[in-house]
Image: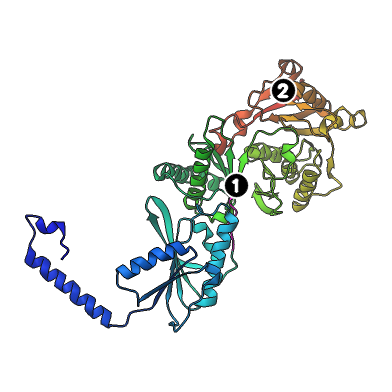
Amino acid sequence: QERFGFEKWPGHQPELWLSLRQEAERRAHEGKQGRIPRMAGFDQDSRVIGTAWKNIQRAGLENVVHVEARAVDALELEGDWSDQGLVLTNPPYGERLSERRELGGLYQALGDAVKRCVPGWRLGVFTGAPEFGKSIGLRSYKQYRLFNGKLPAQLLLFEINEVSAMTPRTPDIPGDVTPRIANEERAAMLRNRLKKNVKTIGQWARKQGIGCYRLYDADMPEFALAIDIYEGRVHVQEYAAPKSVDERAARERLAEALAVIPEALGVEPEDMVCKQRQRQTGTSQYEKQAVSGEFFRVHEHGCVLKVNLKDYLDTGLFLDHRPVRHWIQQHSANQRFLNLFCYTGAATVHAVVGGASRSLSLDMSKTYVGWAEENLALNGADPKKHRVEQADCLAWLADRKTADQRFDLIFMDPPTFSNSARMAGVLDIQKDHPTLVRQAMARLSSDGLLIFSNNFRRFKLDETLESEFEVAEVTRDTLDKDFQRNARIHRCWHIRHKA
């Protein structure tokens, strides 16, 4: 007879142990005499099924539990089963599936199988990838936050019926990085920082009526990310790690961030987009990152603007220039406005809403010219008074044919560097800015203002410009609360003709 080690313990009470054992044996016997619910288990790995059979036999449950090798999409229940029952599953979290499309397809196949085989039952999914729950095609009525070892997980509960049915949706997770937490302590630090920022920056933005703002900008060295809010949607940019950082470790931290952000900010994973931010060279600022075509409208100080979080490196709205745009809106009444390197025309929209008498916006990208035209149309701008043209700004400023055009307010925010094939030359903002400023000042009315800005971190304004014009750096005044932690995000000057 088998014996337990504790029976040799000096404090062991044999009579008490005997009574407890006899009670357990009696209850086991009575239980086996009653009606035992049918149970079946499936896995596509036949080796796993072989191990399961050995465990079932060891427990004496051969006539109670049936298991067999079968893929999810081949699920069938044979024999007489009740109209009500429970399906439990712990599907892969992503480690065994290299591509997110496969993981989304697996969850959708699970949903299709249970809806086909066991309508009216309940489904419980214990998963470390809860963002794929919507791929099942059923609305979860209850979620429990649990742990699988050290790995955070969720138990999702579903009713398998038509009322709970929904269109399956697979989350768009960038770079095939599956959100997962490898280091809970590190993830908790990011979670706490984001919640703190929501209380400070988020509350400030709400009081100011600002819906698009930067919530986090590499606040913690472990998570080199910029996290921006666009009226309930989240745009995450991962700053490219230096070569000294292990790529695997960087991806692990990104996976943790993607797992933490939706929970900390209270958003659905499908409302989050992530990109990697690289140093821009040549025409990279104009190159597409995706082809979703998913535009939506946001609002800023009474202006309506189109943004796209997926298809381009930038979204169509430079958030750090929000105070500059607002200043333009407040000072553009009856002004002739020129927007050089206009991008999507957001600054022009603010000028129009502020009452500019006419405007001209120039950019060499056909895509952004069309985008700017749509932004202006959204705000009721008269296309005869407010024109957008595709043009190389360097060539336009040097063209004598346009030299007689005058403007009262000019905004110029050129890229740091550009060698686009559409340009007549190469733009290096540090080397070329004196010429650009002088040419722009030649188009400025005698009492007008040039707002000159750029985001080259090592930029130095040519000293000769200060001797020719009235120059005042206003960078500090152009940084709202959400960008004050990164004072080098851009620099900005007001330049006027000397009296």
Residue 162 shows up from this direction: no
Q: Which residue is mark 2?
A: 430
Secondary structure under the numbered disc 1 in the rendered image: helix
**Which residue extends farthest right?**
401
Looking at the picture, does residue 476 appear above or below residue 191? above
Q: Amino acid at mark 2?
A: Gln
Give how far across and how far down residue 283 sits, in percent: 75, 36
Report the side of 409 relative to 253 (left or right): right
Residue 82 among magenta residues: no
Q: Which residues are magenta?
A: 169-174
Majority secondary structure of magenta residues: loop
Which quadrant is the N terminus positioned in? Answer: bottom left
Give how far across and how far down residue 86 sits, in percent: 42, 73
Q: Residue at x 52, y 77 (%)?
A: 117
Q: Nearer the viewer, residue 61 or 188?
A: 61
Q: Which residue is mark 1?
A: 175
Report the side of 248 relative to 292 (left or right): left
Q: Residue at x 38, y 50 (%)?
A: 150
Q: Amino acid at mark 1?
A: Gly
**Which residue extends farthest bottom?**
80
Q: Residue at x 87, y 47 (%)?
A: 384
Report the side of 109 relative to 200 (left or right): right
